Amino acid sequence: MSGGRDFWSSRRAAVRAEEEAARAAAAASAAEAERAEIEARDDAEILAELDLPDPDQLQPGDDIRAFMSKAVPDRLRRRALRRLWRLNPVLANVDGLVDYGEDFTDSATVIENLQTAYQVGKGMLAHVEEMARQAEARDAPEPVEDAPEDAEDPPEIAELAPQDTATPDPDPAFSPDTADPQDDAPALPMPRRMRFAFDTDTPRSA
């Protein structure tokens, strides 16, 4: 019995889904037909029917939310938005430095096989490390080439003058046999000391 109930439950759910899909398709078809009819009509007639002002005559502070209704054709909605952008200085004077001010979604302007040095979680770490490595390699001193091991030894410097192994003659001025000229000078007398005597026995006068 449970299998039968599951079958009929699934069958009823499928029928309801088919009915809902049919109703949605009919509503979409009716909306499309109405939209096509509205698009074929004149703008002034549509504005008068919907009781909307001329979008080109909107003034600062006017409410344009009525133009966002589904009954309003897209062309009238765009006219109202363009008028709003001209009236609002924030929207009219676009700053080129605003974030996301450009449209980068056009794949035609993107270079094919575009690559970036940015890594998730690391940023530009690899690029910075490569620049640091190049800077170190540029500032490092050039290595000195080692001299080959089989290079010939430099010749020894020849002696500038032959060494004289003969003993030099002694200087006669410093010979021990030479008499010192001071030895022949007469001996000077010894200095005499002055002596003084005082007579202590002489009486003093009264």
Image: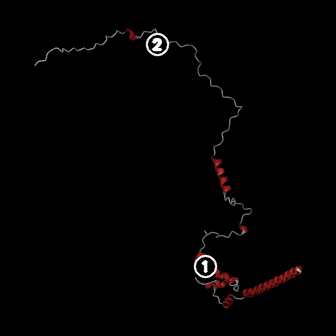
Q: Which element type, helix, strand or loop, lies under badge 2? A: helix
Viewer-nearest of discs 1 and 2: 2
**In front of the other: 70 or 37:** 70
Quadrant in the rendering for residue 3: bottom right
Instruction: Point out which mark residue 97 bears.
Output: none
Residue of label 1: 86
Residue of label 2: 174
What is the CA distance from the residue labelled 1 to the residue labelled 2?
122 Å
| On screen, residue 130 above or below 88 | above
Residue 99 at what x, y percent from top left? 63, 69
**In front of the other: 2 or 112:** 2
Indicate the quadrant containing the N terminus: top left, top right, bottom left or bottom right: bottom right
Indicate the quadrant containing the C terminus: top left, top right, bottom left or bottom right: top left
Number of numbered tags placed on the structure image: 2
| On screen, residue 162 above or below 15 | above
- Amino acid carrying mark 1 in the image: Arg
**In front of the other: 57 or 100:** 100
Residue 67 at what x, y percent from top left? 66, 84
Residue 126 at what x, y percent from top left? 68, 55
Answer with mark 1 or mark 2, whichever residue precedes in sequence: 1
Which class describes the residues within 10 Å of circle 2: few (<14), some (14-19), or many (20+)?
Answer: few
Name the residue: 62% across, 78% down.
85
Name the residue: 66% across, 91% down.
48
